[in-house]
Amino acid sequence: MKVKTILVSQPEPKVENSPYFDLQQKLKVKIDFRSFIHVEGVNAKEIRAQKIDINNYSAIILTSRNAVDHFFRVADEMRFKIPETLKYFCQSEAVAFYLQKYVVYRKRKIYVGQKDFADLVPLLKKYKDEKFLLPASEQSSIEPQTVLNNLKVDWTQATFYKTVISDLSDLADVYYDIIAFFSPTGIRSLYKNFPDFEQNNTRIAVFGSTTQREALDLGLRVDIMAPSPDCPSMTMALEKYVLQANKELKDK
């Protein structure tokens, strides 16, 4: 079947030069965006129930924009006056740049990794006597835990926000030729909202091996996989598949 419509299970990009918009123009297909999951903050009372007192920590490890937002939200809820001596360890330049939304760079001690959490190791070793707090979600990656435990630093992880399944009831009677997923939770959201979902002619695109595994475990047929050596991004994988699928039909 020809591909005319694609549903991307993420929020619509806020930048005008998103590759998805270019893809829509190039392939002459309709691309819709809808978050299958969303993030909700954990309130100060729940943080205290985890026996977390921000006063006890001299350094904060920030792995994402969500971690930044929810750390400062909780600090505000707790009326915690953040000292200028607090150290910030950011997993990437993108996270560090986002931190500027809350702090003045020149007045803060900010340490930045390259991309992966392991890139922070030299910096964490240098400041191994700090007491670290890692604000995270309930579904955080195991990598930070492994790295921090191996370094034998004094650290605590706390759930500051949670990943929640979105209500998709308005999509009940809507059909898409392709649905693109980016996390196992996104796949679970599909079945939580539509327990009787049948794939039929819908093509499923997945990003990452854990998302692929979840799809297969739930009986879905995975038609498009990213990343791959020739398609490192979802947009590239979609483009390759749609061009091939639509060409084959045209040639028949």
Image (cartoon, rainbow, N blue to C red):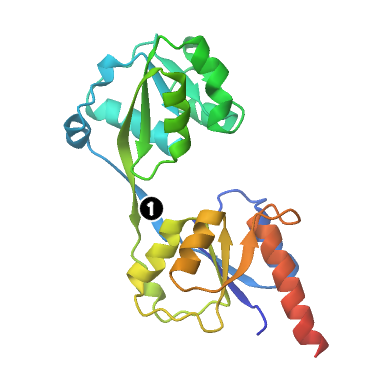
Q: Nearer the viewer, residue 210 or 73?
A: 210
Amino acid type, callout 1: His
SS at mark 1 in the image: strand
Residue 234 appears in the picture as rendered: yes
Left or right, 234 with respect to 182, comes to: right
Q: Nearer the viewer, residue 239 or 76?
A: 239
Q: Position of residue 228 (x, y in %)?
A: 69, 55
Q: Residue at x 56, y 83 (%)?
A: 201
Q: Residue at x 52, y 10 (%)?
A: 126
Q: Position of residue 8 (x, y in %)?
A: 54, 63
Within-10-Å neighbours for mark 1: few <14, some 14–19, many 20+: some
Residue 64 appears in the picture as rendered: no
Q: Position of residue 81 (x, y in %)?
A: 28, 16
* Labels in figure, total: 1
Q: Quadrant of the C terminus?
A: bottom right
Q: Residue at x 56, y 52 (%)?
A: 13
Left or right, 65 with respect to 13, comes to: left
Q: Quadrant of the N terminus?
A: bottom right
Residue carrying label 1: 38
Instruction: Give the quarter of the image for residue 142.
Output: top left
Instruction: Give the quarter of the image for residue 84.
Output: top left
Q: Residue at x 55, y 78 (%)?
A: 202
Left or right, 149 with respect to 91, comes to: left
Q: Position of residue 69 (x, y in %)?
A: 39, 34
